[in-house]
């Protein structure tokens, strides 16, 4: 991608070249307005990032699944770009490996999980919100694993998640993948967008007739600005508004990014394991990982951790995720498996200065914060990002669609 110079003035500045910022830029391509995307990193994609960790294995450090694929805008984008879509069912739905989680136990857990979501659905109809943990059935043996599912889905345990937000999320149950990587698809989607890399924004001054942006490359003015950065950057005031926007600050603080961490291991003897299998123990702990065996038939194992456990592992430093994964897998399959597993790569999103977490969840009582964060200010400041999506928050396509929505709001006011 050719590096763009920072202009002194532009019609529209977009802050952040993740899926939302790229979605906004692509929507504005033929608007006749001058546009620049300001990206703090040295790459585009934001929390979508694919690394080739071996010549065959594409590791999606961030998002990896086309969730709700039948309604996911990146499916059509992939097809337009000629990118292959894999429609194999996800391993967590049906393919358990070995006897570590026997079918009868899996069925019992599935029944308990369905009953929990039924209680969520009923509770969400009430006027008052509550922590989702209040809907766990006292004494149910599966409560810890239901909480583990929340850490993988929300990046946080149920005591930190709004009942109304859990119910608002739309999941059609259809999940597909991109063999070359979701991050690679999103990078291809934004390859021709006008992006200034290594350009971190620190101040958004909207006190005058033009919006003035202070960046690490200098100052520019814009008629309108689309802000797509993760909520934690707004909440921590890594980007400051002048004058202050207390409603936006409060909304962002009610929508923190949780912690989800991924690790890729290499298998020296892949023939012992099924392609696209799932490995997960029937434990009474929330602090557990879930493992995707041989994704796309490659000689790898992808581990996934969430919530407080993921945060602790990321804080423990490089190698902690791989060590925990190997320990867990050996605990499930026997100690001999250790010599067949080799660490390849890990994520540490809570330590990424331009993300500070994985994806958003609404704290109890803050489900309405998504709409507050999404609302424009004075028809000059517009907001996008996965946290502003009413139904597809925490997803790349929810982010992209929100960027398109913000761009169309601008076109409507142009």
Image (cartoon, grey):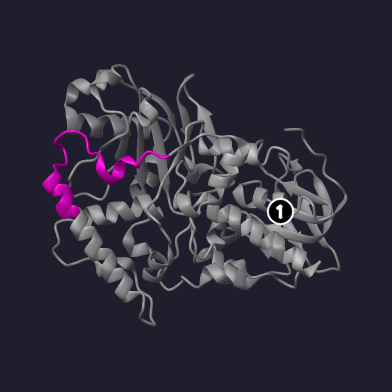
Where residue 134 sits, quadrant-wise, is: bottom left
Q: Is residue 307 visible?
A: no
Q: Position of residue 367 (x, y in %)?
A: 46, 70
Residue 239 vertical position relative to residue 378 in the rendered view, above or below? above
Left or right: residue 154 compared with residue 351: left
Magenta stretch: residue 100 in it? yes
Which residue is at the far bottom? 127
Residue neighbourhood size for the residue with mark 1, other residues' Cα within 10 Å, grouped as few (<14), some (14–19), many (≥20) = some
Magenta stretch: residue 406 in it? no
- Give the position of the N terminus as an image quadrant: top right
- Give the position of the C terminus as an image quadrant: bottom right
Circle 1 residue: 27
Residue 176 vertical position relative to residue 361 in the rendered view, above or below? above
Where residue 230 sits, quadrant-wise, is: bottom right
Left or right: residue 193 compared with residue 158: right
SS at badge 1 = helix
Q: Position of residue 362 (x, y in %)?
A: 45, 65
- Part of the protein shown in magenta: 87-109
* Residue ID at (56%, 58%): 231
Q: Position of residue 205 (x, y in %)?
A: 77, 63
* Residue ID at (36%, 74%): 124
Q: Is residue 101 visible?
A: yes
């Amino acid at each position: 991608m050719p590096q763009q110079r920072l202009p002194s003035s532009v019609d529209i500045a977009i802050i952040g070249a993740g899926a939302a910022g790229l979605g906004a830029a692509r929507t504005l391509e033929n608007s006749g307005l001058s546009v620049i995307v300001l990206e703090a990193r040295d790459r585009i994609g934001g929390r979508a990032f694919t690394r080739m960790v071996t010549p065959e294995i594409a590791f999606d450090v961030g998002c990896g699944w086309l969730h709700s694929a039948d309604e996911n805008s990146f499916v059509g984008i992939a097809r337009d770009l000629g990118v292959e879509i894999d429609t194999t069912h996800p391993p967590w739905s049906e393919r358990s490996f070995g006897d570590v989680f026997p079918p009868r136990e899996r069925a019992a857990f599935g029944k308990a999980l369905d009953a929990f979501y039924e209680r969520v659905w009923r509770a969400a109809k009430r006027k008052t919100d509550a922590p989702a943990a209040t809907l766990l059935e006292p004494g149910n043996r599966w409560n810890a694993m239901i909480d583990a599912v929340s850490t993988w889905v929300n990046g946080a345990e149920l005591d930190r998640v709004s009942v109304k937000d859990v119910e608002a999320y739309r999941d059609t149950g259809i999940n597909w993948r991109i063999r070359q990587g979701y991050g690679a698809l999103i990078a291809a989607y934004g390859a021709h967008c006008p992006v200034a890399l290594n350009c971190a924004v620190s101040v958004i001054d909207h006190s005058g007739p033009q919006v003035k942006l202070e960046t690490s490359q200098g100052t520019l003015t814009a008629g309108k600005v689309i802000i797509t950065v993760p909520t934690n950057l707004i909440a921590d005031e890594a980007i400051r508004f002048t004058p202050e926007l207390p409603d936006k600050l409060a909304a962002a603080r009610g929508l923190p990014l949780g912690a989800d961490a991924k690790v890729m291991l290499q298998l020296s003897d892949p023939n012992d394991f099924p392609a696209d299998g799932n490995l997960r123990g029937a434990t009474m702990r929330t602090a557990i990982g879930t493992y995707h065996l041989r994704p796309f038939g490659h000689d790898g194992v992808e581990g996934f951790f969430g919530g407080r456990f993921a945060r602790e592992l990321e804080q423990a430093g490089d190698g902690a995720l791989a060590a925990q994964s190997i320990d867990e897998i050996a605990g499930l399959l026997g100690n001999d498996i250790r010599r067949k597993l080799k660490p390849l790569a890990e994520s540490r999103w809570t330590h990424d200065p331009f993300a500070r977490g994985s994806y958003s969840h609404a704290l109890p009582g803050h489900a309405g914060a998504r709409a507050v964060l999404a609302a424009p200010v004075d028809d000059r400041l517009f907001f996008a990002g996965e946290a502003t999506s009413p139904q597809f928050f925490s997803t790349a396509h929810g982010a992209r669609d929100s960027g398109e929505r913000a761009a169309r709001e601008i076109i409507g006011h142009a």
